[in-house]
């Protein structure tokens, strides 16, 4: 269980983690900390393993080497029962929403509550509608997932992730595909939820400017390691090549934009 | 040659182990799934309603063909009066359970496999696990139980309609005496025969449902992966049904 009396300042600690899949090394000695009660941003080029990192933290996969600690427990050593107990205090927003397609919006948000508590129907109703109101979709409670746009589905998924007031909220690309208004609403929501409920948040995002507004701490991953960390402001002012390239969105720099390939002209002329 | 054979055998043993482990995981969740009968009832209805029309249509035609062929055959020995008992025995002991299982695998089994496969492909199963809900309890076990309960019921419907079909052709069309038809049938079909049909229906229900949910669950999370899972559901269910049919018949005769 994530206990409310913190014993360590960090809710999540990744210690020297190695992980490889399909013969490719994704992480080569990754170390990072997620402080309690703060919003921590994970950034990095596409395909560096940000989603993979979230899967390590939620115990879906195990590292080849190293430790993943959540609330002082090594996630990869937990029994299924203990892992499920831990996950009851986590909420996660998936990159594509991952709503249950055979249930309405209302039932999707109610799902974790119904599964884990015996609250009376009237209370569940209030709880669900409050969360849907927060993401601006109370009016859509009757719709089925296939009737939602991608951005709406993600907002419903966010309501579902928050519905049991978790201690750790994990967001995988929460802003992708949102219009500027929803983006602003979700950003404020993220900050408010984090502060009001003393939640710890981990946000994976490419939206450097947006995330800089809310994050307390940012990590930039590349090549299986943390290449830079600090407050978003500090990273903005960092003049090292890689950080500058990433924060300013420049195609040329230490991070290759292209997946490794043969020489372009040779291949065209072959 | 020898190497290829050991490899084949190894694969077979590994597949058997995997599916047994899968079955055990389902069974461990069955009591908790039964605590919420709503989900299971929904799945019985789902699997049953999907296959009902096709089961009834095929039952009727299988029965009518049986009437024609049975009459033709029995007439050669001058015993067309025993059409009722011969056809009923064939339906109750063999045709009913086997054909119903094959139809069930093709209709409900493929639907189960592709549904679960799609849930995997769209991260729904992972999302459930992150919400600390075991997909075996919420998705796999209710669907498995639904199939296990639905197939024996469908088998009985198939047999009843099949007998009606035999009667339609034999009595109404070919002129077998109505009274003889029914009394012969009642005289020769024994409780043991009905039991054999029922046991087959239950065993095939377990096999076909297990194969469907297993193939769906382990499907690769892509469009092709889900397609392959449905194909394998039909093929494996058919082969397994016929193998089990032989084994049960050999033991029970
Ligand atoms: N099952 C798998 N088999 C082989 N390689 C995989 C598998 N899953 C992920 N990968 C590889 O792992 C790397 C990291 O994937 P991941 O999804 O974590 O990236 P990401 O940082 O989340 O990218 P994005 O920002 O595009 O979502 C990718 O290069 C991908 O090719
Ligand atoms: Mg990702």
Image: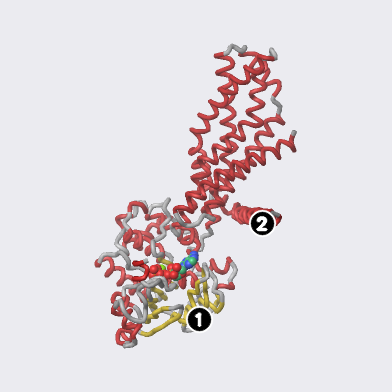
Examine the rendered structure and indicate whether residue B183 appears above or below residue A248.
Answer: above
Left or right for A207, reference B160: left
Q: Quadrant of residue A123?
A: bottom left
Distance CA(mark 1)–CA(mark 2) = 38 Å
Residue A5 visible from this viewpoint: no
Q: Residue at coordinates 53% horizontally, 51% vertically from top-left? A: B36
Can you give x and y, in whole percent of width and height, for residue B19 in the image?
62, 53
Q: Quadrant of residue B59?
A: top right
Residue that numbered label 2 is attached to: B7
Judged from the image, the secondary structure of the residue bearing numbered disc 2 is: helix
Residue lying furthest left: A181
Left or right for A181, reference B92: left
The subunit carrying tag 1 is A
Can you give x and y, in whole percent of width and height, for residue A131 in the image?
35, 63
The subunit carrying tag 2 is B
Crowding at label 1, few (<14), some or many (≥20) Cα neighbours within 10 Å?
some
Quadrant of the drawing holding the C terminus of chain A: bottom left
Residue A26 visible from this viewpoint: yes
Q: Quadrant of ligand 2?
A: bottom left
* Residue toward you, B228 or B122: B228
Examine the rendered structure and indicate whether residue A264 appears above or below residue B75.
Answer: below
Judged from the image, the secondary structure of the residue bearing numbered disc 1 is: strand
* Residue toward you, A1 or B181: B181
Label 1 and label 2 in one chain = no
Name the disc covering residue A29, or none.
1
Q: How is the image coloured?
A: secondary structure
Q: Residue at coordinates 48% horizontally, 80% vertically from top-left? A: A30
Crowding at label 2, few (<14), some or many (≥20) Cα neighbours within 10 Å?
few
For discs 1 and 2, the disc positioned in front in the rendered view: 2
Can you give x and y, in whole percent of width and height, for residue B151 in the image?
58, 39
Name the disc covering residue A146, or none.
none
* Residue toward you, B94 or A57: B94
């Amino acid at each position: 269980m994530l206990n409310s009396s913190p014993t360590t300042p960090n809710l999540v600690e990744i210690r020297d983690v190695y992980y490889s899949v399909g013969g490719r090394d994704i992480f080569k000695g990754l170390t990072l900390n997620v402080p309690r009660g703060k919003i921590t941003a994970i950034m990095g080029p596409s395909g560096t393993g940000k989603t993979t990192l979230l899967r390590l933290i939620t115990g879906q996969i195990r590292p080849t080497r190293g430790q993943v600690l959540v609330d002082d427990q090594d996630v990869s050593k937990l029994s299924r029962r203990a892992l499920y107990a831990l996950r009851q205090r986590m909420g996660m927003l998936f990159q594509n929403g991952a709503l249950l397609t055979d249930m309405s919006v209302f039932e999707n948000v109610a799902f974790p509550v119904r599964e884990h508590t015996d609250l009376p129907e009237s209370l569940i109703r209030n709880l669900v509608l409050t969360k849907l109101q927060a993401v601006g979709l109370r009016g859509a409670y009757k719709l089925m997932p296939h009737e939602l746009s991608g951005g709406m589905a993600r907002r419903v998924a966010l309501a579902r992730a928050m519905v049991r007031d978790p201690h750790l909220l994990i967001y995988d690309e929460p802003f992708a595909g949102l219009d500027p208004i929803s983006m602003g609403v979700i950003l404020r929501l993220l900050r408010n939820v984090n502060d009001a409920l003393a939640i710890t948040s981990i946000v994976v995002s490419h939206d450097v400017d947006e995330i800089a507004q809310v994050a307390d701490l940012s990590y930039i991953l590349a090549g299986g390691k943390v290449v830079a960390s600090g407050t978003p402001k500090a990273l903005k002012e960092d003049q090292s090549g890689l950080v500058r390239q990433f924060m300013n969105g420049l195609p040329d720099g230490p991070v290759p934009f292209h997946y490794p390939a043969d020489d372009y002209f040779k291949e065209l002329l072959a | 040659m020898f190497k290829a054979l050991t490899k084949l055998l190894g694969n077979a043993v590994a597949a058997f182990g995997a599916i047994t482990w899968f079955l055990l995981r389902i069974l461990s969740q069955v009591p908790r799934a039964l605590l919420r009968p709503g989900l299971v009832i929904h799945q019985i209805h789902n699997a049953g309603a999907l296959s009902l029309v096709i089961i009834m249509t095929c039952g009727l035609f299988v029965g009518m063909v049986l009437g024609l062929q049975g009459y033709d055959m029995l007439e050669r020995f001058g015993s067309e009066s025993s059409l009722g008992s011969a056809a009923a025995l064939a339906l109750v002991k063999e045709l009913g359970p086997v054909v119903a299982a094959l139809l069930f695998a093709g209709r409900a089994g493929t639907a189960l496999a592709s549904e679960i496969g799609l849930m995997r492909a769209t991260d729904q199963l992972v999302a459930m696990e992150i919400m600390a809900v075991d997909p075996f309890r919420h998705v796999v076990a209710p669907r498995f139980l639904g199939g296990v309960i639905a197939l024996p019921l469908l088998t009985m419907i198939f047999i009843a309609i099949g007998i009606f079909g035999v009667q339609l052709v034999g009595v109404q069309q070919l002129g077998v005496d109505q009274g003889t038809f029914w009394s012969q049938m009642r005289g020769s079909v024994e409780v043991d025969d009905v039991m054999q049909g029922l046991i087959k229906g239950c065993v095939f229900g377990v096999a076909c449902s297990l194969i469907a949910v297993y193939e769906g669950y382990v499907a690769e999370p892509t469009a092709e992966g889900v397609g392959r899972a449905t194909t394998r559901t039909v093929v494996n269910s058919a082969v397994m049904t016929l193998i089990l049919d032989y084994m049960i018949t050999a033991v029970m005769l």
